[in-house]
Image: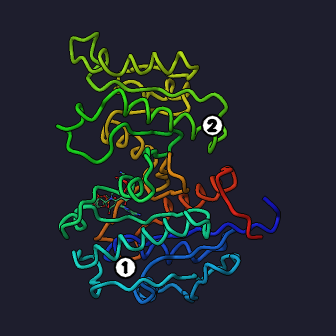
Amino acid sequence: MTNTFIPRLLLTAGEPAGIGPDLCVQVAQQAWPCQLIVIADRNLLDQRAHMLKLPLQLDACDLAQPPTLHQAGRLHVMHVPVNSPVDTGKLDPANATYVLDTLRYAVEACSMHRADAMVTGPVHKGIISAAGIKFSGHTEYLSALTQSQAVMMLAGGGMRVTLATTHLPLKDVPAAITPESLEQKLRIIHHDLVARFAIRHPCIAVAGLNPHAGESGHLGREEIETIIPVLEKLRAEGMNLLGPLPADTMFNPSQLERYDCVFVMYHDQGLPVLKHASFGSGVNVSLGLPIIRTSVDHGTALELAGTGYADPGSMRAAIQMALTLVKATPLHPVNRG
Ligand SMILES: NC(=O)C1=CN([C@@H]2O[C@H](COP(=O)(O)OP(=O)(O)OC[C@H]3O[C@@H](n4cnc5c(N)ncnc54)[C@H](O)[C@@H]3O)[C@@H](O)[C@H]2O)C=CC1
Ligand SMILES: NCC(=O)COP(=O)(O)O
């Protein structure tokens, strides 16, 4: 990377009725050592800046031109019109395809090396589903768009938490935890901790599925039948894996110090712990994708949209993390400097 290299980050503003547009306007108020391009409806950004009483000059973007440094109070915009006028704080299924279009444009630009990373604002999974579109989250959607397997990782509060399963009903979790899926995800996590986070020999602590990691089979057999054989196979290849550990004690601060990353079996086994420790400054990173994607650690907070009370801390952290990954990741970039 030369000194003249300016990373280009694409921000997707997410659900138009939520706080995503506010966050884009808020983070634009400071200088950044990169170019920020928001993919959203420019009138929506303009309107939200007025509501927040923040200065904002919007400039059209041209991805064919070399990136220029972000200047405080200005934003480059890739204009994607909303389908239906936005009533701040009120969901409208008519705008579901608008939200997904912004994600698709970002993925396309990153895949074609016209941008170095995408940073996503929060989407509302329910309203996209209510519009009749099968959608359970960015992680699954970006996996499908890039034909790869993403692994969700949240980082914050001094820990990294990765997930074996993401957005599915609790009753479907045990069947989704197969030897194949665990092995694939552990390989991705190990690979990305080395390649993207520069951890030479990462230690990954793996949670059990059942209370007390199954209590030697007395409280469930998934540990014995599924998890332990996968860990033994990967340990034989040299991976540093602990567990399966009881989830209720593996997050104790003295234990956390021992590992680089925790691998939990389902969404609410690990994320409440992380969000308790870092809500508002945590970052969601999709491992395993051929592109770099980071995101906020929170949702659409509809009730805060347009009020000025949304905390942009996690969006700032997601931008910072994207910049770190761009610099560390050999997959990227095509150096346009
Ligand atoms: N990355 C993403 O796209 C994510 C999307 N979601 C989606 O967001 C929607 C709403 O989810 P909820 O569970 O209600 O979570 P939420 O994060 O939107 O709200 C939870 C609580 O945190 C507050 N909050 C959230 N972000 C905040 C911020 N930046 N500053 C200050 N306070 C903030 C809210 O006001 C609320 O009290 C759901 O559809 C969910 O699926 C949830 C998490 C991540
Ligand atoms: N709790 C994090 C979350 O649900 C975000 O999911 P995704 O939209 O990034 O897949």
**Which quadrant holds residue 28?**
bottom right
Residue lying farthest to the right in this orientation: 3
**Quick one: label 1 or label 2, which is nearer the N terminus?**
2
Q: How far apart are marks 1 and 2 (CA)?
A: 40 Å
Q: Name the residue under label 2.
A: 194
Q: In this view, does 64 lie above or below 192?
A: below
Label 1 crowd bin: few (<14), some (14–19), many (20+), radius 10 Å:
many
Q: Residue 50 carries which label?
A: none
Q: Mark 1 points at which residue?
A: 306
Residue at 47% across, 50% down: 286
Q: Given the image, on which type of amino acid does mark 2 rest?
A: Val
Q: Between 273 and 261, which is closer to the camera in this rendering? A: 261
Residue at 78% across, 58% down: 1
Is 309 positioned to the left or the right of 198 in the image?
Answer: left
**Which quadrant holds residue 194?**
top right
Is 14 positioned to the left or the right of 337 in the image?
Answer: left
Q: Position of residue 68 (x, y in %)?
A: 70, 78
Judged by depth in the image, the label closer to the viewer, 1 or 2, is 2
Q: What element carries label 1?
A: loop
Q: Given the image, on which type of amino acid does mark 1 rest?
A: Gly
Q: Where is residue 287 in the image (x, y as percent from the top left)?
A: 50, 46
Q: What element carries label 2?
A: helix
Which image quarter holds the C terminus?
A: bottom right
One can see residue 282 in this view: no
Q: Where is residue 154 in the image (x, y as percent from the top left)?
A: 46, 46
Q: Do the residues labelled 1 and 2 touch (CB within 8 Å)?
A: no
